[in-house]
């Protein structure tokens, strides 16, 4: 067998080096955010760019609050609605993924996802919302790093502060003030459940946050909340 051409070896080594540097860049941010609160995220930057195409002066509404100043009811509601095995899994809910696959196959289209809170956070922090095999692979790698380097309390704290809750609206504090005129610390069980059920499509649901569909979903989530395990 003839040896590979020198140019091919150099090309492969260059590609491998570039991939390592790229992954190192992501890993560096994950390490940094273990202790330092993100000033912005990839997802927020994209939303701001979209908004400024229509209004150059557009700004996002976001207020960071520490974990202990977010209502435990909201923590329970989000876990019950988005990821009921959050404290137990290591970033991936394999049973949830299998259920989503089966549901999508039955419907013949994508109607359900199996992403955990950690996976959603990985995407929001560093990636784009576009769906592709490459993006999902990158999301999986970042998810593993977050789970290895952060504790569950930090994961939930960052998630609740950066997740989208409406058009240009990010984080629990901004959402609580927008929809209820109170702080995130003051949210009750019913309010928390209503906010949690908006998360899959907040920009759509914000048009009618008290719709019959959301109210019904919120009742279901409220029933699950007492059983939701929350990081302390």
Image (spheres, rainbow, N blue to C red):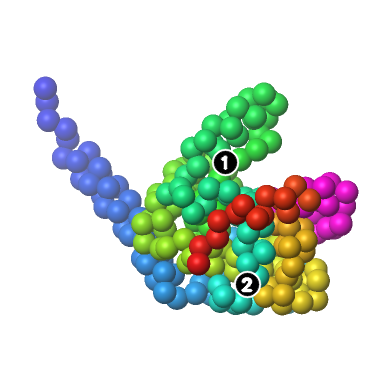
Relative to 10, does residue 208 appear above or below in the rendering? below
Question: Is the residue marked by circle 2 packed among few (<14), some (14-19), or many (20+) residues within 10 Å?
Answer: many
Residue behind mark 1? 114
Q: Which residues are magenta?
A: 199-218
Marks 2,1: beta carbons within 8 A:
no
* Picture residue at 73% right of the left edge, 57% below the top: 193
Q: Position of residue 152 (x, y in %)?
A: 46, 61
In front of the other: 138 or 115? 115
Q: Earlier in the sequence, mark 2 or mark 1?
A: 2
Q: Position of residue 42 (x, y in %)?
A: 55, 62
In front of the other: 64 or 110? 64
Disc number lying in front (2 or 1): 2
In front of the other: 133 or 49? 133
* Picture residue at 77% right of the left edge, 58% below the top: 194
Relative to 186, does residue 219 appear above or below in the rendering? above
Residue 178 position by quadrant: bottom right
Residue behind mark 2? 70
Dot 2: element: loop
Alpha-carbon distance for marks 2 and 1?
25 Å
Residue 160 counted in the magenta span: no
Question: Is the residue marked by circle 1 packed among few (<14), some (14-19), or many (20+) residues within 10 Å?
Answer: some
Instruction: Please give left or right for residue 41 compared with residue 63 in the image.
Output: left
Residue 164 position by quadrant: bottom right
């Amino acid at each position: 067998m003839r040896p590979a051409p020198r140019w091919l070896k150099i090309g492969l080594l260059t590609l491998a080096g570039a991939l390592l540097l790229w992954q190192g860049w992501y890993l560096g941010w994950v390490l940094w955010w273990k202790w330092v609160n993100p000033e912005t995220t990839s997802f927020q930057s994209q939303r701001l760019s979209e908004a400024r195409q229509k209004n150059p002066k557009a700004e996002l509404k976001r207020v960071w609050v520490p974990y202990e100043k977010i209502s435990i009811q909201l923590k329970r509601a989000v876990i019950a609605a988005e990821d009921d095995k959050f404290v137990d899994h290591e970033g991936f809910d394999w049973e949830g993924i299998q259920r989503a696959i089966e549901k999508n196959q039955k419907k013949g289209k994508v109607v359900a996802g199996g992403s955990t809170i950690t996976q959603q956070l990985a995407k929001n922090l560093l990636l784009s919302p576009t769906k592709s095999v490459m993006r999902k692979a990158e999301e999986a790698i970042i998810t593993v790093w977050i789970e290895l380097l952060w504790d569950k309390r930090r994961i939930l704290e960052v998630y609740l502060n950066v997740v989208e809750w409406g058009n240009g609206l990010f984080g629990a504090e901004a959402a609580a003030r927008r929809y209820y005129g109170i702080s995130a610390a003051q949210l009750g069980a019913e309010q928390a459940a209503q906010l949690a059920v908006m998360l899959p499509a907040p920009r759509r649901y914000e048009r009618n946050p008290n719709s019959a569909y959301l109210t019904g979903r919120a009742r279901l989530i409220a029933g699950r909340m007492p059983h939701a395990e929350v990081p302390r």
